[in-house]
Structures are given as structure tokens and as C-alpha cells.
């Protein structure tokens, strides 16, 4: 099959993206096509396996913490970073998740809330992919309702904290060397850097996923895990800490969804041009064109949302509700596009030689994590009315 | 050591190409371009020299504004500096014209080593590299699949007809034209792309290089008369049967033709 071509209906490339943004996108696009795409099918067939052999290459490319400055990170602007996330998710949501968790959920909090010693110790290793991180916020009984968190950290007198609790749905839990664990303390919610080889820490993989199969999802059990006070993130107190991380990751997801949508539309456009029904290409039928036009239009609108939100983020004028709108809208349209693409592929659409169904089921996860579709609606609802409905 | 790498931007291998109305070349508006893949082997080889020790890697390309992207990619991969010969007067050059321009850049840069791809995927002449070497009066080797570069000389392995290999030693300065398969080419990293923003790209015109009137469409000695897609020929033979049968018939045919 011909190489992937992105959508650029409004010719944003020439007028609205810098050279460096386009180069970053193209470098990652090329890598995904050559190194990742040939591997994805096999990993999806296995339950919950990520092509870990690609981690050194991902690090070499600078995919971990690409929008962070210093400590071996690329220091790109947020639009370039977004385009990178778009290209990764064009490959698979599991690939983008790996980079999001490492960069936005694990490196970002150390960068933003960590001590100088914590930054020096962990960030270069994480940028180099030698240390993989996981982010433990969600629990078996509390997802959207983070304030319900039951994991506790007790401060012992001699500068030691003791952590107890269970975290579930944790991406990369069993492959991580470092877990960022959010726990309730007497001073509110705090974040702890927990090396996963500490006594009392255990991670187990969750099996049987229909969605995000090329990604490791785990459950973490913490039983009297002791960590020194120097492992506490000094700059994060209260729920603002984890929510700040989620805002970074959600921003990347808004772009990533565009990648998944473009993968589906690109595939189905080629397919419908070649597929002959009743003497002519499927692409020549009105009903097909209606679906293809929907895809083109929604991808284009999603791109504009991303681009504008990204420029706000770079200018320091971003409001978190903008990210909510972009994540919510873009994942939603990507999912609709994936479904329509799956439909147009007919029976071929249900086998893994084609991508649409893989993206479609992945996007069910993406719709749920990092603030569900409805939670983002309620955030926006509160923004409009001033009335909190969550 | 200073290494000069000659890069050409060619239509992407997946690009859909249409023939220009005058029939003499393809339409290149709206076509996606990439670095000629043989040239990426040359660049990778140069970057390995740099990885192994002290070396300055300079990349040069001839072409319009779009070529900037190829040069920026090369800088993102790790090249130090770029020369961009961007001049409408250079357009339409034949291989000799291109070679004159590259040789003039080489004369200004005086590199110890010039690395090129052994041919461009669009023009397919494979003529430019030896001409550059001749114009510069330096030794060259083409169809190189492997090279060992030391301080003052290069040992190369060349592929000959019929699968034989040849080992050749060249004194520097020299030119090496690499063939496919030489190297696993690195990607431009995000960090490299950020650093590339600060790396210099020198724009040059044909006149800057002292070649006014000597290159470009008006100076060609090789004229492309037309390009065309051959008509579908007669005599295609369809093999029938199960997959196994078809394969054994096919192998039989290939042997019959002495291709195996
Ligand atoms: C593959 C995968 C990977 C993940 N990776 C991570 C990770 O690395 N780290 C991590 O911490 N978490 C991770 N998560 C967890 C994810 O963030 C949560 O699943 C998400 O926050 C939703 O929580 P929940 O599953 O408990 O659903 P719930 O919160 O129980 O939501 C269920 C439904 O109720 C709705 N709902 C919830 N609250 C309200 C309300 N107030 N009003 C109206 N409707 C409401 C939701 O919109 C949803 O439709 C991952 C999840 C998946 C599936």
C-alpha cells in the first residue's frame, strides 16, 4: 500500500506551520511508517504488548518529553509537539499513549513540580528511555471522581512516607522502573516518585482488553511501601498537581486523535478508489462521498482547533477549557470517522490487515481516559453557566 | 576532516507523477519530494565519520526553495552546514552542468572527501559523481557498497557485474559514490531539528560560483527529447493453477531465461 498521506485541505502547512514543525512531523511520520507499522499487527494480536524494542529508537528520535526544556529533551514548541503526537497516533493510540505517559504524565510533573535533584536524577534517564515511568492516579473505585482517592501516604517521623493503596488502569505499570503515585496525605493529595523495585510494590497486567491492545495496562498494589521524603514532589499539593499533568496529556491527545482519524481516512480513500462495486469504484458513489466529505471536514476542523489551542499554549494564554473542547471534540470525530471507515471497508474492515477497526476500538479508550467525553462536557458546561454539574 | 555530501531532492517514491505538457519532464507542482535515497546513504556515511571523530559535514544541494527542506532534514540528522545553490539559471542543467556546479562548490570548500549517491532516482544517469571528480581532478569510486575511512585514505568495496566484489584504495581528497544497501540511515531527531534552526545555510547563485552562462537549460549538451510511458506490450503469459503450480512454473520460466 502507498505510504500514508496526511490531510491538509486548508493548506495550513505553508502558511501556518514553521519549517521546524513540518520537519518534526515528517521525521516522526517516516519513522512510524518504516519502523512501527510493520510491527503493530503482531502486537495487537498478542494481548497487551508494546514493541519495547523500539524504545531506544524512540528516545533517539527525542519522542520522550519533546516539549520540555533541558535535561536531554528536544525543547520543541507545543505545536511541533502536537504534530509529533498526531503522527504517533496515526500509527496506533498505544504508541502515542506510551509517549504521552512518559513525557506528559511522568516527565512533566518531575519537570514542573520536582526538586532540582529529582530533575537531575530522573529526567535525562527518562528522555533516553532508560527509565520508563507510569502514572498512578486512577483506582479501582475512583476514576473521574479523583477526590475519592483512597491511596494514602502516612508521614513517619524520620522523613519516611509509607504508601498503601491500589491503582488500576495504569499504562506501562509492569514495564516501568518509576511510578508517580498520587496519594492522600494529611496535607492533601501529593505525588511520590516510587521506584518499582521497592519492597511492597507489585504490578500486574490487566488482560482481556479489546482496546489499546498494543499498550501495557496494569494494576499497581502498594502495601506499606516506604519512600524517603526526597521522593515527594515538593511543588505539587492538592489535585492541581495531577490535573496539571492531565492537561498536558489531553492536549497531546487532541492532536493524536487527528492522526488516528487521518490514518482511517487515508486508508479508506485508497480502498474505495480501488474497490469496484457495480461496475465502478466505490469512491464514485454518493453515499461514499458523503462519508469521505464528513471525514475531510471534521479532520480539518479538528486540525484548526489543535493549531489554535497549540498557539495559545505556546503564548501562555491557554485556558484548560480549550483543551477540554479539543480533546472532547477531536476524539469524538475521530471515533466517528473510524466507524465510517470501518463500514466502507466492508468485511475487510473487520480484519487486522486494515487499520480502521483497530483505531476504532482504540479510540474507545481514548474517549474514556484523560477525562471522559462527558466529563469534558461538564467542564465546558460549567465554563458557560458557572454552575458545576460534575 | 571535512566531508562534502551532495544531496538531490527527488519526487517521493510514492508520488503520483504526471508528464509535463511539453513531454520533456514530469510536472512537479503538488508533488511530494524527498532526499534521493542513495544520497541518504552518503549522508549517513559522512555522519558516521563525524560520530567516530572530528569531522565537519557540509551538505550541498541544487534546486528551488523546496530544497531547503531536504537541507534542513540533513542538518537535523547531524550535518553541520549547508550550501544551497538556488538559482533559476541552474534549472534544466544536464549532468555536466550539475557536475560543474557541484565541482565549483567543492573547489570553494576543498573537502577531504566528497560523498554522493551513485545515481539519482529521477534522472538515473549516474554520471554526475565521476564528472565532479574529473572536474576536481581527484580519484573516485562508484557503486560503492562499503567504505572504511581513515585519516588520509579510503578503502571501498564496489559491486561488479555478476555479483563479484572489488576492493579499491583511494587517496584523499577523493569522491565516493554510494550504492544502495550501504547503511541503515538515521532519522532526523527532534533535538537535531531544533539545533538545525541555528545551523547556517549559505545560498549561492550560479554567478557566485563563476559559472554564469555555463550551466542550466541554455548550456545543455544532453537534451531530454521526451519521456513517456511505454504502451502495454503484447505477449504477457498468464500462469494458471494452484499457488504451488504457478510458483514452480514461474521458477521454470526464470531458469529458462537464464536469470537464475
Ligand atoms: C487503556 C487505559 C489506560 C489508562 N491509563 C491510565 C494511566 O496510565 N494512569 C491513570 O491514572 N489512569 C489511567 N486510565 C484510567 C482512566 O483515566 C479512567 O478510566 C478514566 O478517568 C475514567 O474513570 P473510570 O474508568 O473509573 O470511569 P467512571 O469515572 O466510573 O466513569 C464511567 C462513566 O460515568 C460518567 N461519569 C463519571 N462521573 C460523572 C459525573 N459526575 N456526571 C456524569 N457522568 C459521569 C463517565 O463520563 C463515564 O461515562 C486508563 C484507562 C484505560 C482504559
Image: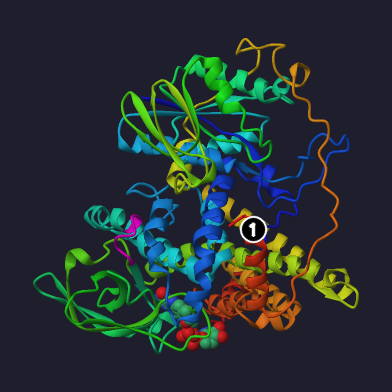
Q: Quadrant of residue A204?
A: bottom left
Image height of A206 relative to B169, above or below: below
Asked whether residue B182 appears in the rendered view, the answer is yes
Q: A255 or B205: which is nearer to us?
A: B205
Look at the image and give the residue range highlighted in magenta: A126-132
Residue at 50%, 78% in the rendered image: A44
Residue at 12%, 69% in the rendered image: A159
Q: B168 or B164: which is nearer to us?
A: B164
Residue A42 position, x and y percent, is 49, 75
Label 1: few (<14), some (14–19) or many (≥20) C-alpha neighbours in 10 Å? some
Element under disc 1: loop
Q: Quadrant of residue A109?
A: bottom left
The residue where tag 1 is placed is A3
Quadrant (top left, top right, bottom left, bottom right) of the N terminus of chain A: bottom right
Image height of B132 relative to A326, above or below: above
**Left or right for A286, reference B223:** right
- Which secondary structure class fits the magenta region best? loop
Q: How is the image coloured?
A: rainbow
Number of marks in the rendered image: 1
Q: Is residue A131 within the magenta segment?
A: yes
Ligand 1 under 8 Å from disc 1 Cβ? no
Q: B228 or B162: which is nearer to us?
A: B162
State the residue lying farthest toward the left. Answer: A158
Asked whether residue A144 appears in the rendered view, the answer is no
Residue A108 position, x and y percent, is 38, 59
Q: Quadrant of residue A267?
A: bottom right
Q: Is residue B51 within the magenta segment?
A: no
Residue A88 position, x and y percent, is 53, 62
Residue B112 position, x and y percent, is 40, 22
Amino acid at each position: 500500500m502507498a505510504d500514508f498521506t496526511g490531510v491538509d485541505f486548508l493548506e495550513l502547512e505553508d502558511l501556518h506551520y514553521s519549517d521546524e514543525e513540518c520537519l518534526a512531523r515528517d521525521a516522526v511520520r517516516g519513522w512510524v511508517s518504516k519502523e512501527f507499522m510493520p510491527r503493530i499487527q503482531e502486537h495487537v494480536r498478542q494481548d497487551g504488548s508494546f514493541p519495547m524494542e523500539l524504545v531506544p529508537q524512540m528516545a533517539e528520535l527525542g519522542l520522550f518529553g519533546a516539549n520540555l526544556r533541558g535535561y536531554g529533551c528536544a525543547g520543541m514548541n507545543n505545536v511541533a509537539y502536537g504534530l509529533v503526537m498526531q503522527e504517533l497516533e496515526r500509527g496506533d493510540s498505544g504508541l502515542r499513549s506510551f509517549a504521552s505517559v512518559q513525557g506528559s504524565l511522568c516527565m512533566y510533573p518531575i519537570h514542573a513540580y520536582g526538586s532540582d535533584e529529582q530533575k537531575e536524577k530522573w529526567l535525562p534517564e527518562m528522555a533516553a528511555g532508560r527509565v520508563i515511568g507510569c502514572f498512578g492516579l486512577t483506582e479501582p473505585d475512583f476514576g473521574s471522581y479523583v477526590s475519592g482517592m483512597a491511596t494514602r501516604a502516612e508521614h513517619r517521623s524520620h522523613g519516611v512516607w509509607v504508601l498503601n493503596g491500589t491503582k488500576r488502569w495504569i499504562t506501562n505499570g509492569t514495564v516501568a522502573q518509576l511510578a508517580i503515585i498520587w496519594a492522600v496525605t494529611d496535607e492533601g493529595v501529593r505525588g511520590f516518585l516510587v521506584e518499582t523495585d521497592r519492597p511492597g510494590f507489585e504490578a500486574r497486567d490487566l488482560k482481556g482488553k479489546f482496546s489499546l491492545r498494543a499498550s501495557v495496562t496494569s494494576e499497581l498494589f502498594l502495601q506499606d511501601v516506604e519512600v524517603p521524603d526526597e521522593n515527594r514532589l515538593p511543588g505539587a499539593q492538592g489535585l492541581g498537581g495531577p490535573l496539571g499533568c492531565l492537561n498536558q496529556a489531553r492536549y497531546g491527545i487532541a492532536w493524536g486523535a487527528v492522526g488516528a482519524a487521518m490514518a482511517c481516512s487515508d486508508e479508506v480513500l485508497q480502498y474505495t478508489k480501488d474497490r469496484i462495486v457495480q461496475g465502478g469504484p466505490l469512491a464514485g458513489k454518493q453515499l461514499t462521498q458523503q462519508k469521505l466529505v464528513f471525514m475531510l471536514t471534521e479532520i480539518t476542523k479538528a486540525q484548526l482547533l489543535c493549531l489554535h489551542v497549540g498557539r495559545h499554549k505556546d503564548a501562555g494564554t491557554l485556558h484548560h477549557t480549550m483543551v477540554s473542547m479539543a480533546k472532547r471534540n477531536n476524539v469524538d470525530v475521530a471515533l466517528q470517522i473510524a466507524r465510517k471507515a470501518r463500514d466502507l471497508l466492508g468485511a475487510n474492515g473487520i480484519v487486522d490487515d486494515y487499520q480502521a477497526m483497530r483505531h476504532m476500538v482504540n479510540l474507545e479508550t481514548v474517549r474514556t481516559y484523560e477525562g471522559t467525553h462527558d466529563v469534558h462536557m461538564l467542564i465546558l458546561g460549567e465554563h458557560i453557566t458557572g454552575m458545576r454539574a460534575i | 576532516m571535512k566531508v562534502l555530501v551532495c544531496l538531490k531532492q527527488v519526487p517521493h517514491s510514492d508520488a503520483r507523477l504526471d508528464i509535463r505538457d511539453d513531454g520533456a519532464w514530469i510536472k512537479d507542482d503538488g508533488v511530494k519530494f524527498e532526499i534521493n535515497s542513495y544520497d541518504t546513504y552518503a549522508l549517513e556515511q559522512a555522519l558516521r565519520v563525524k560520530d567516530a571523530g572530528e569531522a565537519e559535514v557540509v551538505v550541498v544541494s541544487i534546486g528551488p526553495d523546496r530544497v531547503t527542506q531536504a537541507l534542513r532534514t540533513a542538518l537535523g540528522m547531524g550535518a553541520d552546514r549547508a550550501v544551497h545553490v538556488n538559482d533559476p539559471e541552474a534549472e534544466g542543467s544536464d549532468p555536466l552542468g550539475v557536475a560543474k556546479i557541484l565541482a565549483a562548490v567543492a573547489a570553494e570548500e576543498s573537502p577531504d572527501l566528497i560523498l554522493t549517491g551513485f545515481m539519482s532516482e529521477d534522472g538515473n544517469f549516474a554520471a554526475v559523481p565521476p564528472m565532479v571528480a574529473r572536474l576536481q581532478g581527484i580519484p573516485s569510486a562508484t557503486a560503492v557498497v562499503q567504505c572504511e575511512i581513515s585519516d588520509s585514505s579510503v578503502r571501498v568495496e564496489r559491486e561488479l557485474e555478476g555479483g563479484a566484489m572489488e576492493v579499491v584504495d583511494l587517496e584523499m581528497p577523493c569522491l565516493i559514490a554510494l550504492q544502495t544497501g550501504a547503511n541503515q540511515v538515521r532519522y532526523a531527531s527532534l533535538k537535531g531539528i531544533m539545533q538545525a534552526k541555528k545551523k547556517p545555510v549559505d545560498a549561492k547563485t550560479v554567478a557566485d560560483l563563476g559559472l554564469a552562462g555555463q550551466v542550466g537549460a541554455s548550456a545543455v549538451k544532453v537534451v531530454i527529447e521526451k519521456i513517456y510511458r511505454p504502451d502495454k506490450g503484447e505477449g504477457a503469459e498468464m500462469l494458471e493453477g494452484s499457488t504451488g503450480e504457478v510458483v514452480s512454473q514461474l521458477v521454470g520460466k526464470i531458469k529458462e531465461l537464464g536469470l537464475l
